[in-house]
Structures are given as structure tokens and as C-alpha cells.
């Protein structure tokens, strides 16, 4: 392998391991019964403060429509989202966060923020600020590829 290939393998190995460790730590901190996928969806809906279709959410999270339907069904069962039909097109639905979902999102954020903040403190805020543009560009390049 060339030096660039070795560098690429090392970079993605670190990213994959960091992703796995972060997911494990955050999943353990989430309120009982909440999965990381649930938190991601209610956190997204809380931030955009608007309705989205299940297909739009599936695209945002890079998952299949079936996977998103499963997540939304569980969130609806828990009372964290409202799913309503599109009044103009009965084949489509719209999803919004419920008051219960907002409380769950706030509770989950309160549980995971100390973990995330400690990681940033340990690395140093300036180093994290320098890494963010590189990580964002990497994400953007990966999103553009099939």
C-alpha cells in the first residue's frame, strides 16, 4: 500500500472506532427505553421545529424508509411524535415532535451533554474547532458518493 492508502486506512479505522465508542457511551447514558436512533430523530425534529415526511427523515439519517418507519412507530407508541396524514395526498404522512418528545429530548440532552463536553474538554476546544471543518468536508464528500 502507498503512504496515502495507509493514511486513509488509519483515518477511517480511527473514525470507525471513535464512532463505535461514542455510540456505546451515549446509548448507555440515554433515558431507559430510548435508543440512539430515537434520540437522533426527536433531536432533529426539536431543532428544525417543523414537520417532515418519513421519507425526508430517512434521507437525513441515511437509512431506509422501512428503518425510519420502524423508528417512527416506536416514537409514536412512546408518545414522542405525532404522525398525521397529508390532507392533500393521503399516501403521505407528516411527523412532528410532541410535547412529550420535547421533554424526552431535553432529558436525553441533559444525560449526554456531560459526556460530550468532557470529551471536548479533554481534547481542548481549539483542537476540536480545528478538526470540525475537516470532518464536515469529509462528511460532505462521502454524502456526494453513491
Image: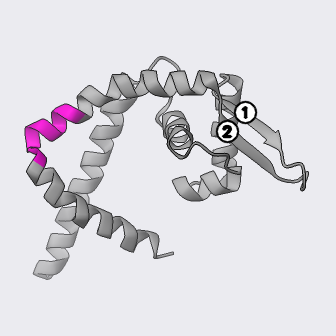
Q: Is residue 111 among what the camera can see?
A: yes
Look at the image and give the residue range highlighted in magenta: 117-125
Towards the viewer: 77 or 136: 136
**Residue 106: where, in percent of width, then height?**
45, 25
Q: Residue furthest front?
A: 49
Q: Is 120 covered by the magenta stretch?
A: yes
Q: What element does badge 2 sit on? A: strand
Percent coordinates x, y for residue 79 in the rendering: 68, 23
Compared to residue 48, the image places residue 56 above or below, namely below
Q: Secondary structure at mark 1?
A: strand
Residue placed farthest to the bottom in the image? 2
Dot 2 or dot 1: first in sequence order is 1
Say which mark, if any, is on residue 96. 2
Q: Which residue is depicted at the point 53% across and 53% down?
A: 61
Left/right placement of residue 31 relative to residue 132 reads: right
Task: Look at 67% across and 46% down and name the residue there.
Answer: 51
* Total marks placed: 2
Q: Residue 30 lies in what quarter of the image?
A: top left
Q: Position of residue 5 (x, y in %)?
A: 19, 77
Callout 2 touching callout 1 (CB < 8 Å): yes
Q: Quadrant of residue 138?
A: bottom left
Other residues around mark 1 within 10 Å, as few (<14) / some (14–19) / many (≥20): some
Q: Which mark is residue 141?
A: none
Residue annotated with mark 1 = 82
Q: Nearer the viewer, residue 144 or 66?
A: 144
Residue 34 visible to an observer of this rendering: no
Q: Residue at x 36, y 65 (%)?
A: 139
Amino acid at each position: 500500500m502507498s503512504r496515502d492508502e495507509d493514511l486513509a486506512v488509519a483515518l477511517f479505522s480511527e473514525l470507525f472506532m471513535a464512532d463505535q465508542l461514542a455510540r456505546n457511551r451515549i446509548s448507555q447514558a440515554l433515558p431507559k427505553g430510548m435508543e440512539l436512533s430515537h434520540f437522533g430523530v426527536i433531536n432533529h425534529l426539536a431543532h428544525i421545529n417543523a414537520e417532515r415526511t418519513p421519507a425526508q427523515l430517512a434521507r437525513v439519517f441515511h437509512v431506509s424508509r422501512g428503518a425510519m418507519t420502524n423508528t417512527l412507530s416506536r416514537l409514536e407508541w412512546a408518545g414522542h411524535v405525532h404522525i398525521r396524514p397529508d390532507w392533500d395526498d393521503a399516501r403521505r404522512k407528516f411527523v412532528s415532535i410532541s410535547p412529550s418528545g420535547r421533554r424526552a429530548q431535553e432529558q436525553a440532552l441533559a444525560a449526554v451533554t456531560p459526556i460530550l463536553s468532557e470529551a471536548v474538554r479533554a481534547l481542548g476546544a481549539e483542537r476540536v474547532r480545528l478538526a470540525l471543518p475537516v470532518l464536515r468536508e469529509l462528511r460532505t464528500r462521502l454524502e456526494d458518493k453513491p
